[in-house]
């Protein structure tokens, strides 16, 4: 069968064969990444004629299949970034198939030579200014154990630039009280150390007084009782829990639309305003590429807005 004939669909395979798509998903570092990529693989399989990706004969994958996938994404009105994500997944599955001697090298080389779409968009999300950050932290203070915990969570996310999945997985053993830092393994299996700003020290200290110094999760779920709150030190909050906590507090603090990743953007902006270069910030945020870090720079946008609003005519 020629490559052009393969474009309509991929043949089915026997379910007991090695599945490069499944193998590729398992190589990813975080659960969120695995979920995202698994959804992409599932959609690719549907576009190529299958209801389930675990029965697709990926050894028949060819460069021409990408045109069918791209056409389906364009029909759905997907953004360039979404198309590039699907291309990355498409190439990743092909590489896994080739690495396991399932895909001919000639087919893999043609697929690997596919180029990502070039595009530029305005930065997503927002960076909180100093007043907004203060209001978010103060809005948590209600004297409860949960209030102390939530305030410390947001202090770490803004002050250290942690992702949701990273902050919920922190353990007490990750905290160094001497140099006021956290050391942990984050996204992409990268180990890094982040330092807490001095003006946020008190929020961690106050939380640790409430939490205690027992081993376990640094920010555990709380079972609220009539007399005392019980901390589930052997459990972790979910990333969705962090999202909900922030939504509630942002509404209470009248901050408007805000998302957890905006706290990471806030950290990047504060670092750059303090004079950090992009390479130092790249290490602090755990990015593989400095180009990714550059997209977190909101200073130019804020400066341009201020100048434009003060123009006189």
Image: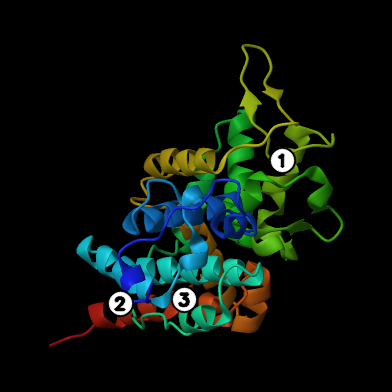
Residue 257 screen position, x and y as percent:
34, 51
The residue furthest bottom is 313
**Residue assigned mark 3:** 295
Instruction: Tell me how far mark 3 sits from mark 2, CA to CA.
Output: 17 Å
- Residue lying at 57% horizontally and 49% vertically, measured from the top left: 154
**Residue assigned mark 1:** 206
Q: Which quarter of the picture shows residue 9?
A: bottom left
**Dot 1: element:** helix
Badge 1: residue crowd in 10 Å (few <14, some 14–19, many ≥20): some
Q: Is residue 49 left or right of residue 163?
A: left
**Dot 3: element:** loop
Is tag 1's residue or tag 2's residue first in the polypeptide sequence? 1
Q: Is residue 236 visible?
A: yes
| Residue 7: mark in rendering | none
**Residue assigned mark 2:** 305
Q: Nearer the viewer, residue 32 or 252?
A: 32
Q: Is residue 40 left or right of residue 35?
A: left
């Amino acid at each position: 069968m020629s490559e052009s004939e393969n474009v309509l669909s991929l043949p089915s395979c026997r379910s007991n064969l090695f599945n490069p798509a499944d193998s590729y998903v398992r190589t990813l570092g975080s659960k969120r990444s695995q979920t995202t990529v698994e959804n992409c693989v599932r959609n690719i399989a549907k576009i190529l004629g299958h209801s389930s990706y675990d029965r697709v004969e990926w050894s028949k994958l060819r460069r021409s299949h990408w045109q069918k996938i791209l056409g389906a994404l364009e029909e759905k009105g997907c953004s360039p970034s979404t198309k590039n994500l699907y291309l990355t997944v498409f190439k990743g599955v092909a590489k896994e198939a080739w690495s396991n001697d399932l895909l001919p090298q000639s087919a893999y080389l043609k697929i690997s030579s596919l180029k990502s779409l070039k595009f530029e968009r305005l930065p997503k999300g927002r960076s909180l200014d100093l007043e907004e950050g203060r209001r978010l932290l103060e809005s948590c203070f209600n004297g409860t154990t949960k209030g102390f915990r939530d305030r410390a969570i947001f202090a770490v996310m803004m002050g250290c630039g942690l992702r949701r999945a990273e902050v919920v997985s922190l353990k007490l053993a990750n905290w160094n009280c001497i140099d006021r830092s956290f050391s942990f393994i984050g996204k992409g299996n990268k180990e890094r150390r982040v330092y807490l700003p001095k003006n946020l020290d008190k929020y961690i200290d106050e939380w640790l007084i409430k939490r205690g110094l027992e081993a376990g999760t640094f920010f555990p779920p709380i079972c609220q009782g009539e007399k005392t709150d019980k901390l589930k030190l052997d459990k972790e909050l979910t990333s969705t829990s962090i999202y909900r906590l922030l939504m509630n507090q942002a509404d209470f603090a009248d901050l408007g639309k805000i998302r957890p990743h905006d706290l990471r953007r806030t950290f990047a902006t504060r670092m750059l305003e303090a004079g950090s270069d992009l390479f130092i910030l790249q290490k602090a945020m755990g990015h593989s590429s400095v180009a990714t870090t550059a997209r977190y720079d909101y200073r130019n946008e804020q400066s341009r807005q201020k100048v434009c609003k003060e123009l006189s005519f």
